[in-house]
Amino acid sequence: MEVTASDLDNLKATELRLGLPGIDAPEKPAPVSPRGSKRALLVSNEECWPGKNKSPEADSGGQEAQPMAKAQVVGWPPIRSYRKNSFKARKEEMEAAGLFVKVSMDGAPYLRKIDLKVYQDYKELKEALDNMFRCFSTGELSGMQGCNGSEYAITYEDKDGDWMLVGDVPWEMFMSSCKRLRIMRRSEATGMPSSP
Amino acid sequence: MSEDEDGGGGSAKSRGGGGAPPPFSDQVLEIVLENVLQFLSSRRDRNAASLVCRSWYRAEAQTRRELFIGNCYAVSPRRATERFRRIRAVVLKGKPRFADFGLVPINWGAHFHPWVSAMAAAYPWLEKLCLKRMSLTDGDLSLLAHSFPNFKELSLICCEGFSTAGLAVIAEKCRHLRVLDLIEDYLEDDEDEMVDWISRFPETTTCLESLGFDCVGSAVNFEALEALVTRSPALRRLRVNHHVSVDQLHRLMARAPQLTHLGTGSFGSAAAAIPQGGNNVVDLMSTFAGSKSLVCLSGFRDVAPQYLPAIHPVCANLTSLNFSYAEVSAEELIPVIRHCHNLQIFWVLDTVRDEGLQAVAATCKDLRELRVFPLDPTEDSEGSVSDVGLIAISEGCRKLRSILYFCQQMTNMAVVTMSKNCQDLVVFRLCIMGRRRPDHVTGEPMDEGFGAIVMNCKKLRRLAVSGLLTDKAFAYIGKYGKLVRTLSVAFAGNTDLALTYVLEGCTKLQKLEIRDSPFGDSALLAGLHHYYNMRFLWMSSCKLSVRGCMEVAQRLPHLVVEVIRERDEDDDHEAVEKLYMYRSLAGPRNDAPPFVEIL
């Protein structure tokens, strides 16, 4: 199975490195509250900026074990924290609204994560899930109502914590309420109790 | 001393008071003078008038209505309120500008408290207050609300320390409030302690003219907001935060068709429950069409591009458009831009791309101010705008006065072209985000480009430089930048000569902020003749030592020389990591935190 971007993410997360936590500032959103709490100022000064102690980082070579991103310099480029946080905060809020969701499949040894924003409609989503979990199932996945050829049903957990069948509501509404996906064996789906 | 401070207090002989009262004829003259001086509004004119003689000094002090304090530590509140007794409006600025970029530690200072306490006693008729980069608490806001029965206008820009609780007191107690503008402030709000401040405005018709809270992180009570807007017939400017959905905005606009300035909240985010279909956009468009007075639009957080056409009906009337929080592509922006023939102020993200700027150049012939911000403010991001866009703007927008341009790469030729085409430039701020990056075509330093700007733009007052710059660039600035008042330098220059050129040449220099440039003590000492004419000097990550800074402090007793040391610096006590120095009549401040050493 080919190595995908999400595999790289996982590898990086488990990689042993010498370096300050949070050093991957460009990739992981820093925990800055959009509400501008007291902590936010501290965070923006201390956590987001590795290697802030001795500034010209470029000259000292930024040797703090940065495999990927160049060492960030405090306050450069000169963009107000307010503006920087506006975009980060939005991204956090949108993530919270369920755009990156975990996908589990009954019987599969590990989960996957997908970005719902990438898909335009249910068809694309199904195809993507098909591709992702092909190796774990013999036939085609299908979660749509009325399709009874497959042994799996695609379900999702919504904002209220209920497990719903994928495909009932308009795509936009699904996108904004879906918190995670579960590809469920039909045998489980039929006699299942109210909570997973 | 002083071009824009509150007058020549340094010259002791111009202080009034003490000794016998002036003879009767002088008193009459003073009254006559007061009647004349009351028409003088410019503070620079007033400062000049106050230096003529004691009589003029007194008359001017009695008739000044607006007090401008460019540095809250330059004078003590008591001294200011003793000299000027009849102030109705105060502008007060605190932290150095580099605090916006995280270079000044928290709790550095700029506390509002001593000022509001002094003013509460001295100016019971205070009507207007504008604070920039000050630190204020809810207690301060409460004191304000209770001390000034006639209070009308509050503007807080880049301030911090207060919360919705403070806003609630203002809303409730300031019965004559016309303006409440919160601009890029950091509110201290814990989730569970948020206060419904909108509901605290008086239930009767209000005299609100301007309400701006786009920086308030917490959602406001929408029903209360709608009711407030409904009972505020004088409301002309409304800027809501991103929690207000496009449907809610629709309702607000219907209540206030007389608005001239509108800051939208979220403009069609997918997260909100949007009913299907394009009907929404059509409805919104007709609402915009009904707002015939709109001249300024901003906000556009979380834009859904299909909602953009809704603003087409008002574009032709717009003089100011702020899209700098809207992540929309050039293709989506260009149709909007093409309607904006009368635009004078345009703020946008670099997603506008060179093509978008070309559209601006073709359409917005009256453009005075352009700001292009980076969506991804890092050094390695992909540049979306370049020298091509800059040249296009310079060719199309000849009346340009102010530009702030973030890019990844630039050429001297483009900057030279702008210097020749835009002769009215007063503010030129170019930020090439890659540090020390040369001209990407010729590989040369950016000296010639910035040199051309100072040479050709004879009205230039504010300059920010970037890219690879040698001492030569600063030689140009010192030689030609005779009107430059504010200069920002980062990662530039080779030797002390560069700073020396500037300090010796720029006779009108008032604000100088420098970071990460190889300037040392001898350059610092080259400015001794000028520092009393300046509001401040900031130098961080340069090559200064305690000895050099100490010498400045000793030679210039009216300069406060602050050395700021972060907590985790090593024990190199000789090097000065951050220097902030400013002229002051008040002497060393008594509220300095432990990490500030005043030499």
Image (cartoon, coloured by chain):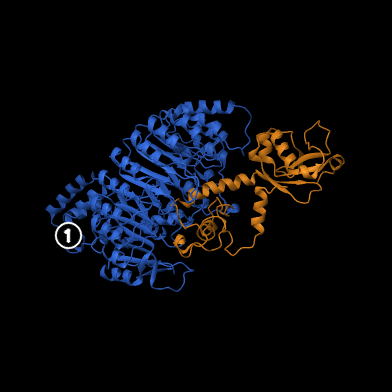
Chain colours: A orange, B blue
Q: Is residue B372 above or below residue B522?
A: above
Q: Is residue B373 above or below residue B568?
A: above
In the image, residue B355 lies at what x, y percent? Answer: 44, 34
In-front residue for pair B431/B337: B431
Q: Is residue A136 left or right of residue B494?
A: right
Residue at the location (31% across, 48% down)? B450
Residue extending furthest toward the front: B442
**Chain letter of the residue beneath label 1 in the structure image:** B
In-front residue for pair B40/B389: B389
Q: Is residue B256 left or right of residue B555?
A: right
Q: Would residue B236 be seen by someone viewing this image from the given angle?
A: no
Residue at the location (50% across, 34% down)? B230
SS at circle 1: loop
Residue topped by disc 1: B21
Q: Is residue B108 left or right of residue A149?
A: left
In the image, residue A16 lies at what x, y percent? Answer: 64, 63
Residue at the location (46% across, 57% down)? B102
